[in-house]
Image: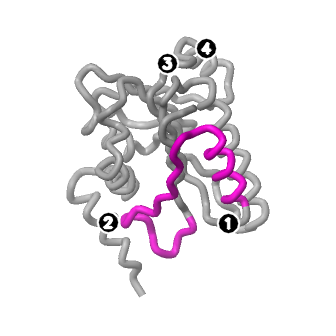
Amino acid sequence: MKDFSDNWAEKAKRLGYRSRASFKLEQIENKYKIISRSDLIFEFGSAPGGWSQIISKYMNKQSRCFSFDLLSMREVKNISFFQQDINSSEFNLIAKNYFNEVDLVLSDMSVNLSGINIKDEEENKELNYSTINLSKKLLKKRGNLLIKTFNNRNLPEIKSLFKDLFHKVMAEKPPASKTSSKEVYLLGLDLK
């Protein structure tokens, strides 16, 4: 049986979006206005550029966005893309210039799933931790963080970290997410 959310992939193709993921971020943006209220944005896991397209669409003219991925990505208007690992010294050279200045960090990163649940869950948890720790350095007071995580045994622990850092924490499952997927997006608003 065809997953209903395949309609999102078809719609993305029709509209020139690079992936269904574009709609996930757009649905969150329409609800919370996190992009349109941000002057400086860092995006992790940007390839193939679906989220970058939405950032470009909703960001203000004076805003800047730096996007990073291990994979290459075709240019997206108004997005500064770097093919770099966020744990690399090259990334650190860029990031340290913006410590405590970023309004919004977005991460659609996930490890390549092996199908071995315990391994995938632990590796994604480490990736979430890495993003959270990096965001603590980058975000300015009252900044916001959105990450992809998964509805599994690690979610309460990751949610708890968010609650320690942010005044408001929401778990979002956008309509464009596959119904069969365990992915969930954690949004932290207003860094303490």
Q: Which badge, 4 or 3, is on the more N-terminal residue?
A: 4
Q: Which badge, 2 or 3, is on the more N-terminal residue?
A: 2
Q: How many other residues sit within 10 Å of disc 3, few (<14), some (14-19) or many (≥20)?
A: some
Query: For the residues marked 4 and 3, what is the alpha-carbon distance in whole angstroms?
Result: 15 Å
Q: Nearer the viewer, residue 130 or 80?
A: 130
Q: How many other residues sit within 10 Å of disc 1, few (<14), some (14-19) or many (≥20)?
A: few
Bounds of the magenta segment? 154-182
Regarding mark 3 in the picture, which secondary structure is present there? loop
Regarding mark 2 in the picture, which secondary structure is present there? helix
Q: How is the image coloured?
A: one colour
State left or right for residue 53 relative to residue 149.
Answer: left
Query: For the residues marked 3 and 1, what is the alpha-carbon distance in whole angstroms?
Result: 32 Å
Q: How many other residues sit within 10 Å of disc 2, few (<14), some (14-19) or many (≥20)?
A: many
Which residue lies at the image location 38% right of the left edge and 56% below the top edge? 24
Which residue lies at the image location 66% right of the left edge and 41% below the top edge? 164
Residue with the most extreme bottom position? 1
Mark 1, residue position: 152
Residue 33 x, y percent position in the rendering: 32, 42
Does 164 lie within the magenta span?
A: yes
Does 107 lie within the magenta span?
A: no
Amino acid, disc 4: Leu
Amino acid, disc 2: Trp
Tags 2 and 3 in contact by the CB under 8 Å rule?
Answer: no
Regarding mark 1 in the picture, which secondary structure is present there? loop
Mark 4, residue position: 93
Mark 2, residue position: 8
Tags 4 and 1 in contact by the CB under 8 Å rule?
Answer: no
Query: For the residues marked 4 and 2, what is the alpha-carbon distance in whole angstroms?
Result: 38 Å
Which residue lies at the image location 63% right of the left edge and 19% below the top edge? 92
Quarter of image, res 15: bottom left
Which residue lies at the image location 68% right of the left edge and 29% below the top edge? 87
